[in-house]
Amino acid sequence: MSFFRVLRAEFLKYFVQQFVTFRTAFWFLILPFANGLLFYSMYLPFSNRLVPLNALGFNVAVDIVGFTLIGQLLYTFFVGMSVAGVQFDNERSQGTFEAMLLTPASRMAIMLGVLFAAAAQYLWLIIGAVITFLIFFRLPIILNDPSALVLSVFLTYTALVSLGICLEAVFIHTRRGVMLGTMLQEPIAFVSGTILPSSAFPPLFLQLTYLIPLTLGLISVRLILLAGATLGDVLLPVFGLLAMTLVLPLLGKWLISHAEASAKVQGTVGLF
Amino acid sequence: MLKQVPKCKAQLDFSRKMNLFWRATIASARTKIILYTRFLSLTGLGLSFLPPLLNLGTAWVLYNIVYHQSTSTNFVSATNSSDYFSFVVVGSAFFVYVVATMFTLGRTMFWDRASGTLEAVMLTPASTLAYMTGSMISAFGTATLNLVIMVVLGTLLGFHLGSLNLSLFAVGLVFMIISLFGLGLIVNAVTLYFRDRTNTANTLTTLILVFSGIVAPLPLLPSWAQVIGSTIPFTYALNLLRQSLIATTSTASYTDAVLLIITSLAYLATGYLLLYATVKAIRRRALYALF
């Protein structure tokens, strides 16, 4: 069974089922816009309306709107990836999950198909929230190296998709996947620098946050877009993202095979 | 000779009606509390704390570490206090009632239908409003435990009480409950009629979180956001609760009180009408059962 045919079939299945639903509109349009406004408004009570951005030798103060908007753009992609595995819960409740795992289809193709469908839902955000933000707020951008921006955004998304593969294994392993995937969101939003400048954290804690792909993506994209950094300035986070893009799928593949074997042994594939 | 069949409804006097109403209310509240404790999920409990905890954590870091407690004059004049962290503690603590309204009270009949008990409840002569009032007592009772935890946590991190105004606090609290009960009835009608498990609750919770001034005073938000916020009674309730708890001077805002009373009663009336309209509609359309 061709890898790409399985991937395409899975993508189309979930795209048709999910793309035009209120649930998608909530997760990819309403929630990011509302969160953006919420976290933007948390900066308004202070006398200084600029956010300190200290990373990789840069020590600048950036505008709240740009800081918040970039945070929400990348964070929403992370949210989409972290709950993409909910599709497997749907399969389970429809009674088709067991049949799907009985086919010889590549598990990685299935996972990627689901993740690509989740990524396609991101169009809601791009079309809706970004335009709304651009209409209602002024967005100051200092872009000196467009290629660095493209590479950073691309690698952030690929690293998050790779992380999504690992998280999907949780949904196969346990029926509490939705709960666990949802529980990740607020802590990651807090520690990754989505809402707060990461310079506010203690140095040791800050080092640990670099293990999250979202943190590296936020540092590089914010520096490129808001502080005029070039590719040479953000090489470190870009290489980090590249490493995660290459390593995490291997880990994900092992986790998925382990989760599938474990679910079959424990009999948790069916709905009962 | 034919015996006259007693018409229970006609023969019941007001006190008996009230007695039945309270019995149904208490029974409903007891059932919901028993169900809550029996199926208590620690992950679910933790999940309900995460959004307010995120607000609290973010506010603490911004106030103490990033901006070194330097709030703007606009903030001080809008809130009558310069303590931003205490401002967010009060907002986040009382926000637990909004979550309870949306996810517990607002889905009462939805879950009853899912568990197969709604039809049986509707066959009894108990008042539907009493049934929902009991559900509200249960939901707000358990939410109060969350509020206490939030306040304790906030106190450990630096929450300070200002000049306490008990009468203002009582007005704010009572009408907050009335308005949220009305909102809960509206959400219950929507979730029941449209069989919507999460979307309505999620969307309204998010909108209230953003537009009712939980993390920033409404006058600091853009004008269009202020317009949306002014339609939510919780905004006025929070203003009064903050005035009564953390303001440095104990001046009462009568405008907020009047607007809170008006909007609360409007929400309650809408919720009441929608409750009966929905119950009637789903009975006619045979939507009580789960199929």
Image: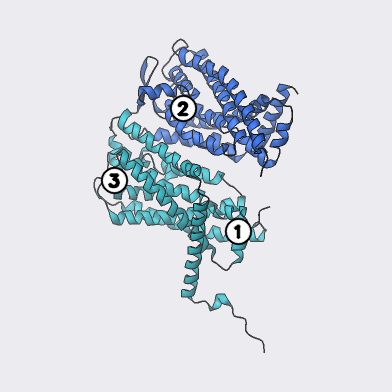
Chain colours: A blue, B cyan
Q: Secondary structure at mark 3?
A: loop
Q: Residue furthest right?
A: A1
Instruction: Locate the C terminus of chain A and report the quarter of the image it occupies.
Output: top right
Q: Nearer the viewer, mark 2 or mark 1?
A: 1
Q: Which residue is mark 1?
A: B118
Asked whether residue A18 appears in the rendered view, the answer is no
- Amino acid at dot 2: Gly
Residue B254 x, y percent position in the rendering: 31, 53
Q: Residue furthest front?
A: A265
Residue B95 x, y percent position in the rendering: 42, 46
B146 left or right, relative to B187: left
Report the residue at 38% width, 57% height from top. Answer: B174
Report the residue at 66% width, 35% height from top. Answer: A265
Q: CA distance from mark 1 to mark 3?
A: 43 Å
Along the viewing direction, whichever of A179 and A42 lies nearer the viewer: A179
- Amino acid at dot 3: Ile
Q: Which residue is mark 2?
A: A71
Dot 1 falls on which chain?
A: B
CB under 8 Å between callouts 1 and 3?
no
Report the residue at 59% width, 58% height from top. Answer: B278
Along the viewing direction, whichever of A234 and B46 lies nearer the viewer: B46
CB under 8 Å between callouts 3 and 2?
no
CB under 8 Å between callouts 2 and 1?
no
Q: Is residue A107 above or below residue B270?
A: above
Q: Which mark is residue A217?
A: none
Instruction: Locate the N terminus of chain A and report the quarter of the image it occupies.
Output: top right
- Badge 1: few (under 14), some or many (20 or more) residues near its Cα, within 10 Å? some
Residue B154: image quadrant is top left
Along the viewing direction, whichever of B24 and B241 lies nearer the viewer: B24
- Amino acid at dot 1: Leu
Q: Which mark is residue B246?
A: 3
